[in-house]
């Protein structure tokens, strides 16, 4: 099974969370649904942290700079 790219997983999880919040407004959540929501929320936080860390760690190419143009 192929794994999902982190940014695609993050998008999918955010959509699922939005749907769950909408469902909660109209009928509440069962304990099982609330637990699944919490698991997704924790995963979202981990993905956001990982993606922000990766973007900060990218080496900058000194040859590509506005000063060199």
Image (cartoon, rainbow, N blue to C red):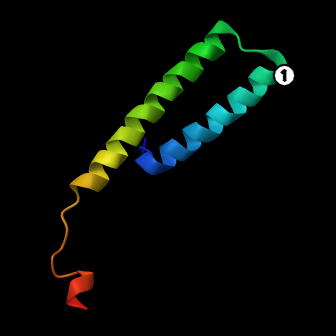
Q: Around disc 1, counting alpha carbons within 10 Å, would you say few (fewer than 14), some (14 to 19), or many (20 or more)?
A: few
Question: Quick check: 18 above or below 39?
Answer: below
Q: Judge from the rendering whether residue 13 lies leftward or rightward of residue 1; answer left or right.
A: right
Q: Is residue 28 left or right of residue 63?
A: right
| Quadrant of the image containing the C terminus | bottom left
Work out which residue is located at the far right of the displayed protein and give it.
26
**Which residue is rendered at x = 28% and y = 50% of the image?**
54
Question: Could you tell me which residue is drawn at 30 percent across and 55 percent down?
Answer: 55
Mark 1 sits on what residue?
A: 26
Residue closest to the far left:
62
* Residue, far front: 67
Q: How many callouts does the rendering have?
A: 1
> In the current view of this chain or complex, which residue is farthest to the top?
31
Whole-percent x, y for residue 24 in the image: 75, 21
**Residue 21 at what x, y percent from top left?**
70, 27
Q: Residue at x 20, y 88 (%)?
A: 68
Left or right: residue 8 compared with residue 22: left
Image spot of residue 47 (x, y percent): 40, 39
Residue 29, quarter of the rendered image: top right
Q: Position of residue 6 (x, y in %)?
A: 42, 46
Q: Quadrant of the N terminus?
A: top left
Give the vertical position of 64 relative to 38 (above or below).
Answer: below
> Which picture quadrant has residue 61?
bottom left
Say which element carries label 1. helix
In this picture, is 30 found above or below 23? Answer: above
């Amino acid at each position: 099974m192929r794994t999902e790219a982190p940014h695609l997983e993050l998008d999918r999880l955010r959509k699922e969370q939005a749907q769950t919040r909408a469902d909660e407004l109209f009928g509440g959540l069962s304990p099982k649904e609330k637990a699944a929501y919490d698991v997704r929320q924790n995963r979202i936080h981990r993905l956001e942290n990982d993606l922000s860390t990766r973007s900060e760690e990218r080496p900058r190419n000194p040859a590509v700079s506005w000063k060199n143009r």
